[in-house]
Image (spheres, coloured by chain):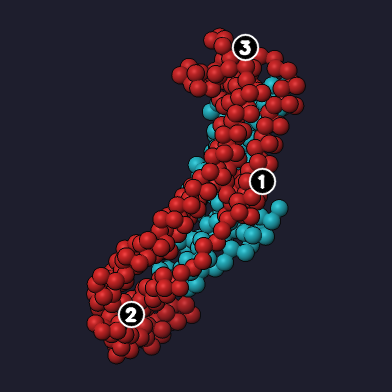
């Protein structure tokens, strides 16, 4: 059953290479178009300030042991005290204002635009491939596959005696779709518009850090409790002995 | 290609004595460089497998061989002192192993068809 089919080299010249080339070019085009069209949302001063405060509190927690106990307590009360501490959120305040402003209109528009800019070129290219390049064997996959893939990979070809490795253009299109992601990350750099996983992660991160909805109040409260929990243990008293030990270990 | 130059830029982590203190930004930079190396090498591995006419299991063997060579090369570039550049040695050896698989299969199919079938 594994006869070698002889395929016309015109297929190679006019289908394989042009299809890959077209997909690369469309990806590059889409990347630059999305760069032109992307609207940078204006950073909200209050949300930015709050995220910076949270960062400062986190640094304080991480490096608490390098400063004397009194300085640490002073900083901690600056953050945590009940009247005007930075991390103290009066009960009903933080949530309503930001929930409406930042979350739904702008974010939803952004995500819809990004999704559309990904879906439309893919759909158009798929339709183009189906219209022009259907009904013949396009390529041979170098590794053997089971019979179950036949329906998926060979949909234009109606002969059941052809080896499953001979696939139609539709499967070549899908192979290109997945395989060119690596190439795009090389030629377009990290932040390119073709990588869906990257974009999902970015929108998730933007949603977490942009601080909309109940998030800032919760983040501040969490930081405050974390700061309350820190046990201060000053590392510096024994520092001369430890430095001497390390140095003697190196020089020995 | 700028790969060798980029790998030479792989920055040292902050304090070689204290293994807990690694500069996160540098580690990320190094990991990104390793990812680029692997992507490029998976494309090259696809071309190699296609030109040699490997089919089936041998082709995938070729891919894993090239990935192992990539890990060895990265380890040699850090002069086998991976804890100074990455946070764990098995991260640099096995991270991104399977991410280049789709690119490999694409270029393998392409080159194999161009050279052998047509």
Element assignment for label 3: loop
Element assignment for label 1: helix
Which quadrant of the figure has residue B3? Answer: bottom right
User: Do callouts 1 and 2 point to residues on the same chain?
Assistant: yes
Along the horizontal axis of the image, is B79 left or right of A212?
A: right
What residue is drawn where x is 54% and y is 68%?
B12
x and y percent of residue A84 in the render? 29, 84
x and y percent of residue A78 in the render? 31, 85
User: Do callouts 3 and 2 point to residues on the same chain?
Assistant: yes
Q: Chain of mark 1?
A: A
What residue is drawn where x is 48% and y is 52%?
A109
The residue at which mark 2 appears reads as A86
Which quadrant of the figure has residue A76? Answer: bottom left
Q: Residues within 10 Å of mark 3 (few under 14, many from 20)?
A: few
The residue at which mark 3 appears reads as A3
Q: How many marks?
A: 3
Q: Earlier in the sequence, mark 3 or mark 1?
A: 3
From this view, report whether residue A128 is shown above or below residue A112: above
Foreground mark, 3 or 2, reads 2
Which lettered chain is shown in red? A
Quarter of the image where the C terminus of chain B is located: top right
The residue at which mark 1 appears reads as A29
């Amino acid at each position: 059953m594994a006869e070698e089919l002889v395929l016309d080299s015109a297929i190679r010249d006019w289908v394989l290479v042009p299809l890959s080339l077209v997909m690369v070019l469309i990806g590059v085009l889409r990347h630059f178009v999305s760069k032109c069209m992307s609207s940078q949302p204006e950073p909200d001063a209050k949300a930015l300030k709050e995220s910076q405060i949270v960062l400062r509190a986190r640094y304080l927690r991480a490096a608490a042991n390098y400063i004397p106990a009194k300085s640490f307590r002073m900083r901690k009360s600056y953050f945590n005290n009940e009247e005007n501490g930075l991390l103290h959120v009066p009960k009903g305040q933080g949530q309503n204002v930001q929930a409406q402003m930042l979350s739904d209109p702008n974010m939803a528009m952004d995500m819809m635009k990004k999704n559309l800019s990904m879906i439309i070129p893919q759909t158009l290219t798929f339709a183009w491939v189906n219209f022009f390049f259907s009904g013949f064997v396009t390529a041979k996959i170098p590794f053997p596959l089971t019979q179950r893939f036949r329906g998926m990979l060979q949909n234009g070809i109606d002969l059941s005696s052809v080896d499953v490795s001979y696939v139609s253009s539709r499967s070549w299109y899908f192979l290109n779709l997945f395989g060119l992601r690596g190439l795009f990350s090389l030629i377009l750099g990290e932040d390119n518009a073709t990588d869906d996983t990257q974009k999902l992660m970015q929108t998730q991160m933007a949603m977490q850090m942009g601080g909309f909805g109940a998030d800032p109040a919760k983040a501040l409260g969490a930081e405050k409790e974390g700061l309350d929990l820190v046990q201060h243990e000053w590392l510096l008293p024994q520092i001369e002995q430890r430095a001497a030990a390390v140095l003697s270990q190196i020089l020995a | 290609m700028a790969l060798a130059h980029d790998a030479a830029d792989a920055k040292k982590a902050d304090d070689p004595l204290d293994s807990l203190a690694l500069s996160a930004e540098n580690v990320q930079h190094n990991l990104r460089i390793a990812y680029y190396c692997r992507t490029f090498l998976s494309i090259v591995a696809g071309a190699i497998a296609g030109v040699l006419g490997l089919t089936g299991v041998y082709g995938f063997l070729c891919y894993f061989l090239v990935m192992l060579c990539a890990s060895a090369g990265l380890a040699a570039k850090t002069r086998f002192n991976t804890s100074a550049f990455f946070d764990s040695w098995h991260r640099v050896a096995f991270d991104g192993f399977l991410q280049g698989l789709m690119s490999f299969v694409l270029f393998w199919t392409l080159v194999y068809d161009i050279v052998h079938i047509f």
